[in-house]
Image (cartoon, rainbow, N blue to C red):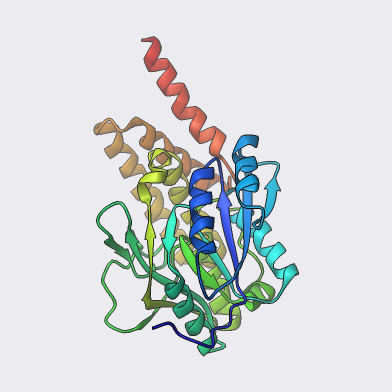
Amino acid sequence: MRESHVKTELAIIILNWNAAEDTMRCIRDILAWEQLRPTIWIVDNASAKDDIAAIARAYPEARIIRNEVNLGFSGGVNRGIQAALQAGDVPILLLNNDALIDESSVIHMLHTLQASDDIGFVGPLLFDADEAHTFISAGAKNPVLHHQTRIDTFPRAEQQEVATMSGTAILIRPAVFKTVGLLDEAYFFSTELADLCRRARQSAGYRCIIDARARAYHRIRRSARYRSALYPYYIIRNRFLYIRKFYHALPRLWLIGFWASYSLALSVKLWLTGETATRRAVWLGLVDGLQGRFGGQNERVLRSDSGRKAKNARQ
């Protein structure tokens, strides 16, 4: 039985980077909803021309924002948020194009967001769509106080407050952005939502809630080709940015020392196991994090990996 009296105003922001098929599948699923009629914003991060042209032809109802360069997750999403805020004062759902979420889950999340003015973020339980819907997480922990940040225990209550949550699917109150600002683009990819949740909690008391009635499914294998280099690089590097922003004096020194030692040990381990691409990414993330080199570094990270492969091919 469907719930009634749902506030249907909603903006959905989907980031595209050379993945037109995934993005079009995501749009198609949303357009099949029966109660909600959201505005769909597609932010393209400098994909090939044919890629974004295919989306525009297939779904003219989607509003497309074209970036001339790849601005990463944080920069790309920010362009969508800015456009959505200019268009109206409605909740904003950030949704990965390799994620699946049904209408009833979004309705549950909307109800939760509307239930209390101090709720700034609502997320679903997250499952792996490629592994028989294996449970992944119910939100996440502080990224510099925990090595494993995913909360991988199933919640006992209908709602669970958390420190932060995945950007795979997250519903955000528009007042959050008006109060504390947009995502910090220095992160480029990874940890930017932990940063936003912390700023929102510290400055305005906004809470992050996981709604156990809502479920999203992440097709993790679709992004597997980036997991050996880009993912570890940004995860390692961005911890140092988070530490710089939120910790001072002795806690900052202790955390920098801990994560530097951890990253160095991980680099040695990866070298011993022959995982060269990931080792290079970890090492580069450590060096850049300590030196304060932030923002997008895709080309440098991928170039170091491709250079290694080319060298091996010549031998």
Answer yes or no: is residue 48 visible: no
Q: Nearer the viewer, residue 5 or 310?
A: 5
Left or right placement of residue 85 versus residue 76 in this view: right
Going 56% across and 56% down the picture, which residue do you hit? 14
Q: Nearer the viewer, residue 113 or 265?
A: 113
Going 46% across and 55% down the picture, which residue do you hit? 239
Of the 4 image quadrants, the one containing the N terminus is bottom left
In the picture as drawn, the residue positioned furthest to the right comes out as: 86
In the rendered image, residue 303, in percent from the top left (x then y), is placed at: 51, 28
Going 59% across and 71% down the picture, which residue do you hit? 37
Answer yes or no: is residue 180 visible: yes
In the rendered image, residue 138, in percent from the top left (x then y), is placed at: 35, 70
In the picture as drawn, the residue positioned furthest to the top comes out as: 315
Residue 140 sits in quarter: bottom left
**Compared to 49, does 121 lie above or below?**
below
In the rendered image, residue 125, in percent from the top left (x then y), is placed at: 36, 70
Going 62% across and 76% down the picture, which residue do you hit? 9
In the rendered image, residue 312, in percent from the top left (x then y), is placed at: 37, 16
Q: Nearer the viewer, residue 87 or 191?
A: 87
Left or right placement of residue 117 versus residue 178 in this view: left
Q: How many marks?
A: 0
Of the 4 image quadrants, the one containing the C terminus is top left
